[in-house]
Image (tube, coloured by chain):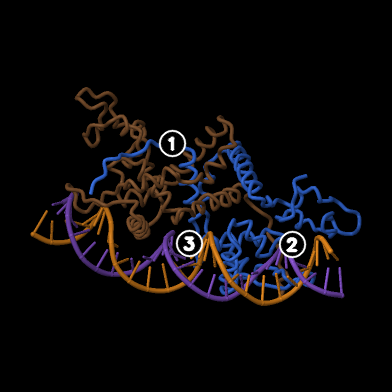
Chain colours: A brown, B blue, C orange, D purple
Amino acid sequence: MVFTRYYLPMTDRLSDLLTRTARLIAGDGHSAGLKPVQWQALRYLAVANRFSRTPGALTTWLGQTKGTVSQTVAALERKGLVARSEDSEDRRLVRLSLTPAGYGLLAEAPEAVSDAMTAGLATPERAALEALLARMLTGHLAKRGYRPFGQCADCRHFERDAADGAPHRCGLLALPLSDADADAICIEQEAA
Amino acid sequence: MVFTRYYLPMTDRLSDLLTRTARLIAGDGHSAGLKPVQWQALRYLAVANRFSRTPGALTTWLGQTKGTVSQTVAALERKGLVARSEDSEDRRLVRLSLTPAGYGLLAEAPEAVSDAMTAGLATPERAALEALLARMLTGHLAKRGYRPFGQCADCRHFERDAADGAPHRCGLLALPLSDADADAICIEQEAA
DNA sequence: GCAAATAGTAGCGACTCGATACAATTTACT
DNA sequence: AGTAAATTGTATCGAGTCGCTACTATTTGC
């Protein structure tokens, strides 16, 4: 059976490039018995602050559904890389954290394709790409009603050098923050 | 069980942005009963020329393994969107083409996330992004020993306005080319 | 108080994807 | 010509992805 109709011209080269590149990056990371999504979850849990390490936050960070994330977390827990704990204030919440094995595995992770791909770019190019991607991503998330995430220190609730003992302070959650906290990813973050 | 170790600072913001964006784009396209990879395969088969519509070419285009592509093609064939045919010259090859149903489905495909994300960019930004992505992608493919693909008319084997009846000609395969051929994606393409 | 919203889990079905093994050609080198 | 090596593609396995539809706990909003 032969069909007479022939091929269509390629309409959008940029979208095509983006999709091909995306598949390569998103499909990367089949090592140490982990899947790509599991690596990404592990990396997130290593850089997110204690308020942001829940299945729900992971769900919007990864752009997946609750059910899928629940299984991803279960798989990481089975492998002994992630531990669950309860929240004493809100008992619906599950707090997640990396185990020492989780940190250990992350430390010896092989280089990701995304790093290799950007390694050849010059500094201004990296900055330009970062700015474009940030706009594309936050724009997309906003359209979906999702939070953008971001670093604690860039938040409008971040109070630097709060004078009551701790180095800094979160005005939203009314909690003291360490210097390490200030660098962490927070789901509540709002641009200053 | 509580672990004392706390979170690591985020090291590479660009790589992180890229990975998150990539997952959103690569995971997009769960409509009409097709999976994201199946849509991408369908789009490729619509824009690739007749020499490039084989399972092998699709394999490097999608960045997957032969086995996976074999199943993807089988799924599309089951759905009646793609047809197989034999090659009379090399009987190991399988030639793929879209059926009328395949073209029809593609024509009414919903807007992809990659399009929506880039829609908000200004023209020079789109050009800059395209150039960066092209370098990243071809650099990565070259490192892996894969072909970059590309449009027929941009190839060094493309002979415009060949005077023997057909509009153009491919010097590598010694074949006549139509105007439509010139726009198609070719696996043999080498930059002029 | 009680309905509605929120956080998470359970199970299903189709599919992805790397890995290994395998069959059918075609090509390269004697 | 004649065999070894390379090329093209399929078959099968197991773990996991992922959207979907329930479903169970909680907490919050009148």
Instruction: Determine which residue is flagged by label 2.
Output: B51
The three-letter amino acid code for the residue at tag 2 is: Phe
The chain identifier of the residue carrying mark 3 reads B
The three-letter amino acid code for the residue at tag 3 is: His
Labelled disc at residue B70: none
> Which SS class for mark 1?
loop
Q: Is residue B168 visible?
A: no
Q: Position of residue B100 (x, y in %)?
A: 64, 70
Q: Position of residue C24 (x, y in %)?
A: 71, 76
Q: Residue at x 84, y 50 (%)?
A: B160
Q: Nearer the viewer, residue A155 or A76?
A: A76
Q: Residue at x 43, y 50 (%)?
A: A39
Instruction: Determine which residue is flagged by label 1.
Output: B11
Labels 2 and 3 in the same subunit:
yes
The chain identifier of the residue carrying mark 1 reads B
Between the C-alphas of marks 3 and 1, the distance is 33 Å
**Which callout, 2 or 3, points to the residue nearer the camera?**
2
Q: Nearer the viewer, residue B162 or B64?
A: B64
Q: Position of residue B13 (x, y in %)?
A: 45, 37
Instruction: Determine which residue is flagged by label 3.
Output: B30
Q: Is residue A67 visible?
A: yes
Above or below: residue A40 compared with residue B90: above
